[in-house]
Image: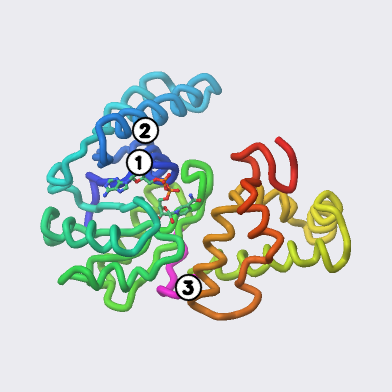
Amino acid sequence: MEVTRIGVVGLGAMGAGIAQVAVEAGFAVVGREVTDELGETAAARIGHFLTRKVEKGQRTQDERDAAVARLETTTDLAALADCDLVIEAIVEELDPKRALFAALERTCRADAVLATNTSALSVTEIAAATSSPGRIVGMHFFNPAPLMPLVEVVRAELSSDDAVETAVAVVAQFGKVAVPCHDTPGFVVNRVLIPLLNDCVRVLDEARVTPEALDAAMTNGAGWPMGPCTLVDLVGIDVHVHASEALYEKLREPRMAPPPRLVAMRNAGLLGRKSGRGFYAY
Ligand SMILES: NC(=O)c1ccc[n+]([C@@H]2O[C@H](COP(=O)([O-])OP(=O)(O)OC[C@H]3O[C@@H](n4cnc5c(N)ncnc54)[C@H](O)[C@@H]3O)[C@@H](O)[C@H]2O)c1
């Protein structure tokens, strides 16, 4: 299906980034938040990032203004009625997502594709809250969405070929890389990366190395672009622990469980870059 108008529900860290990517790619975007103020704050943030691009010579002022003009924010779900594709990026909890998809099914055209940006929930379980699960897929962006090229396009048990193909085509129009995959815990990247990062944290204590030394080992010995402690600090220790717990709950593999050292850091408020202290001080 040809997509020209995209809805984004939830304009937090991910949704605002996705809305930015979509307006930059030329789509008309309707962003839905719970209050006018949150919608306006997100629109202002997107405008600010696009102004920075003009300052850096990456966009002209006209391109920036045209992109900003393609974004409309609302608190009214009915404003999404004409969207060809809706991408959901609200809180990572099953019940609110299922309630939202049931409401989207009542609001949107029958041929609209509905996508969730969930990291760790089952797309199939979200789709089961509707009577038209064929049009529901996962579109898993990475943080920050404007910078990270990958989008995992997740095929749930009942997703139609058409819905998957529409999502893959839109990702290409965004100038990003789509990796289609099936609906399994952690999809592709987190299924590999989360236990690997947990192993790295356990090695800190087992091999008695410092975070600096471990990061030096993995960047110089394994060619990682960034050391694991730097990466966990960037992702957020709370976010990583939450994702680990979700994967462990589903797969019951010991490597998926968050190492006690990370849980203790999370409990102490050492969340990494965003709190000013994690493995490193910022
Ligand atoms: N942060 C990440 O690194 C990351 C990466 C990939 C995917 N995700 C996923 O993206 C989703 C959003 O994560 P986030 O980090 O952007 O969260 P966030 O808390 O920054 O943003 C969520 C936003 O949704 C809004 N919201 C809540 N319910 C709503 C509703 N019914 N309608 C409209 N808006 C609503 C909130 O006001 C908030 O602004 C989650 O499913 C998360 O798992 C997050």
Residue 267 - label: none
Residue numbers of the magenta segment: 178-185
The residue most toward the front is 268
Which residue is pictured at 51% across the width and 48% down the height?
A: 143
Label 2 near ligand 1 (CB < 8 Å): yes
Q: Earlier in the sequence, mark 1 or mark 2?
A: 1
Disc 1 Cβ-to-ligand 1 distance below 8 Å: yes
Side of 146 relative to 219 (left or right): left
Residue 182 among those drawn in magenta: yes
Q: Which residue is mark 1?
A: 11
Left or right, residue 112 beside residue 206:
left
Task: Please report contact status of discs 3 and 2: CB closer than 8 Å, yes or no.
Answer: no
The overriding secondary structure of the stretch rendered in magenta is strand
Question: In the structure shown, which secondary structural element does the residue marked by tag 3 occupy?
Answer: loop
Q: Is residue 212 above or below residue 29?
A: below
For marks 3 and 1, the one nearer the N-term is 1
Q: Amino acid at mark 2?
A: Ala
Q: Position of residue 2 (x, y in %)?
A: 22, 53
The image's mark for residue 42 is 2
Q: Quadrant of residue 204?
A: bottom right
User: Residue visible at 48% across and 69% down?
Assistant: 187
Position of the N terminus by quadrant: bottom left
Identified at 40% across, 67% down, the residue is 121
Q: Secondary structure at mark 1?
A: loop
- Residue 185: image tag: 3
Tell me whether the residue at label 1 lies in contact with that at label 2, contact meaning CB atoms closer than 8 angstroms.
yes
Amino acid carrying mark 3 in the image:
Pro
